[in-house]
Amino acid sequence: MKVIVLTVNQYKEKDAIVTAVAEKQLITFLAKGINDPKSKNSVLNNPLTIVDIELVEGNLKYPVLKNSKQLFTPLKVEMDANYLGALLFIGEMMLNLFPDEEKYKMFACLEEGVEALRKTNDWLMSLLVFMSHAIRIGGFELEVNQCVICGNKQKIVAFSFVDGGFICEKCYHEGISINLSKEQMLLLRKIFNARDYLLAGTDYSRQDALVIFDRVTEYIQEVFGYHFKNLKLLTIN
């Protein structure tokens, strides 16, 4: 069974309780000897590692890890603060934005996200696309293809997180703040229409992306009701 490690909690001296997300479920199991560097299962100590595991039922509360094979690790020889911060930020979103029974819905997005982050080393765009998936799967999808009020696709003049999407010239009123430029709205549209991570590593305005990252982060914290703790690890400038 292919899983992505989310948390590793020490149990006794060398064992650990591992929680991982699979394609159809969240699973928790006992990994014996995982804290021994010589153990073949020690690779599970790294959150967001993708592994193929085989479990057996035992007399304990959790099934026991029998075998494991590492399929992918997000860790690299050279990792800057933003890369590590992005990994922690993704992990924090997985742990706190979704209830346990719904975490599996993010499996494909998470797998593609950590792989894209390592391949492109583009922490900013990788996070933005991942966040757009989290918003969509969480039920808070934003309208980026037409006016959220009337459905008009022409003369879009603003984007309102309060109203949930683009606002056209006809529906715009003074109560709606224009806090994104035309270029930023176009980039936002590309991000939220993306169903993969092909945008990561491509040319885009970093300053525009940082503005969007700031706005989207605020939106997620408001609608999901969770305040990020690892955000300060990223260099947002």
Image: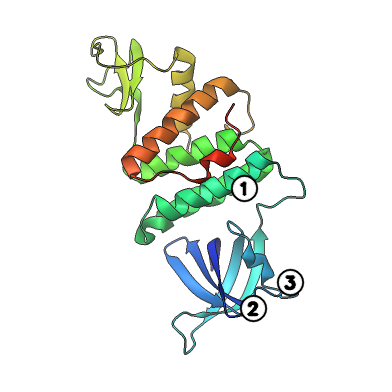
* Residue 48 in the image, given as x and y percentages of width and height: 58, 56
Q: How many marks?
A: 3
Q: Please name the amino acid that badge 3 sits on.
A: Pro
Element class at badge 3: loop
Residue indicated by mark 3: 37
Q: Residue at x 48, y 62 (%)?
A: 22
* Residue 31 in the image, given as x and y percentages of width and height: 58, 76
Residue indicated by mark 2: 14
Question: How many other residues sit within 10 Å of disc 1, few (<14), some (14-19) or many (≥20)?
Answer: many
Question: How many other residues sit within 10 Å of disc 2, few (<14), some (14-19) or many (≥20)?
Answer: some
Q: Please name the amino acid that badge 2 sits on.
A: Lys
Residue indicated by mark 1: 115
- Kindly report which numbered mark, 1 or 3, lies closer to the viewer in this rendering: 3
Residue 61, placed above or below residue 110: below
Q: Using residue 173 as the reference point, say whether residue 183 is left or right of it.
A: right
Residue 122, placed above or below residue 57: above
Residue 112 seen in the figure: no
Q: Please name the amino acid that badge 1 sits on.
A: Glu
* Residue 20 in the image, given as x and y percentages of width and height: 51, 64
Instruction: Give how far apart the Cα atoms at labels 1 and 3 are.
Output: 25 Å
